[in-house]
Image: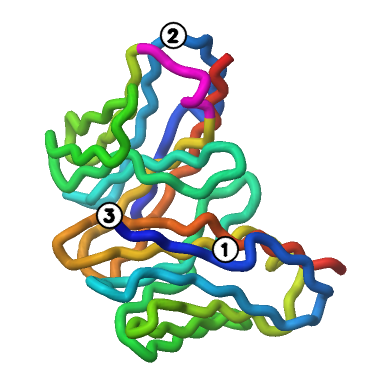
Amino acid sequence: ILNVEQSPQSLHVQEGDSTNFTCSFPSSNFYALHWYRWETAKSPEALFVMTLNGDEKKKGRISATLNTKEGYSYLYIKGSQPEDSATYLCASRGSSGTYKYIFGTGTRLKVLA
Amino acid sequence: SQTIHQWPATLVQPVGSPLSLECTVEGTSNPNLYWYRQAAGRGLQLLFYSVGIGQISSEVPQNLSASRPQDRQFILSSKKLLLSDSGFYLCAWTPGGRSDTQYFGPGTRLTVL
């Protein structure tokens, strides 16, 4: 059974600050790691899917890295804006033979103007 | 383009009453389908997933059940709701494949009184 953990649970940053969060997952049987952005009153929206050790993905001011050997992924937001306020979820898929996605509890980000 | 529908958007039900939540996907065929629940203050919990008509995998033993009567239809049911069934229910689909992402429906807010 996979156990995906995210830290911190929540944080507040000032507009313009850069920030990062961590997603930890069991490194054995790794298959794919997903990042989602979940705004209040909306559905989770996919940010990145990462599969290879050392992967780096970027979308605007948001980027993510992946270390499958040690079992962690970082999500970075450069120059945070109030519209970045949301809960950021990561999910791990354990192996090619399973279709299960195990989600972390999320990091709730509040960007103060 | 693909779209996912969920209804109802909100539901208030008494303890012991039955439940039926429906999810349909348009614009794709043979999707993998998922039901998640977010209880208050908790992360997304995988309840059921299906990789084909009539194929249901249950992740959490409880008083809920799921069915997939048609390729793009996924139904979550209960014969008798418990207070602990309150939460936000999300349906999601993936096209399949290693780098596939999950696409979420708008969700159903269920309150059991």
Q: Secondary structure at mark 1?
A: strand
Q: Do the residues bearing badges 1 and 3 touch, measured as CB atoms within 8 Å? A: no
Please identify the quadrant where the C terminus of chain A is shown. bottom right
User: Could you tell me how many numbered marks the image carries?
Assistant: 3
Structural crowding at the residue carrying mark 1, measured as other residues with C-alpha within 10 Å and reported as few (<14), some (14–19) or many (≥20): many
Q: Position of residue B102 (x, y in %)?
A: 36, 57
Q: Earlier in the sequence, mark 1 or mark 3?
A: 1
**Residue shown at the point (31%, 85%) measured from the top left:** A52
Q: Disc 1 to disc 2, how far (Cα)?
A: 35 Å
Quadrant location of residue A8? Answer: bottom right
Confirm whether the magenta stretch covers residue B82: yes
Q: Secondary structure at mark 3?
A: loop
Q: The magenta stretch spans which residues? A: B80-86
Amino acid under label 1? Answer: Tyr
Label 3, on which residue? A100
Structural crowding at the residue carrying mark 3, measured as other residues with C-alpha within 10 Å and reported as few (<14), some (14–19) or many (≥20): many
Lateral position of residue B83 relative to residue A111, left or right? left
Q: Do the residues bearing badges 2 and 3 touch, measured as CB atoms within 8 Å? A: no
Label 1, on which residue? A88
Q: Which mark is residue B16?
A: 2
Q: Residue furthest right?
A: A113
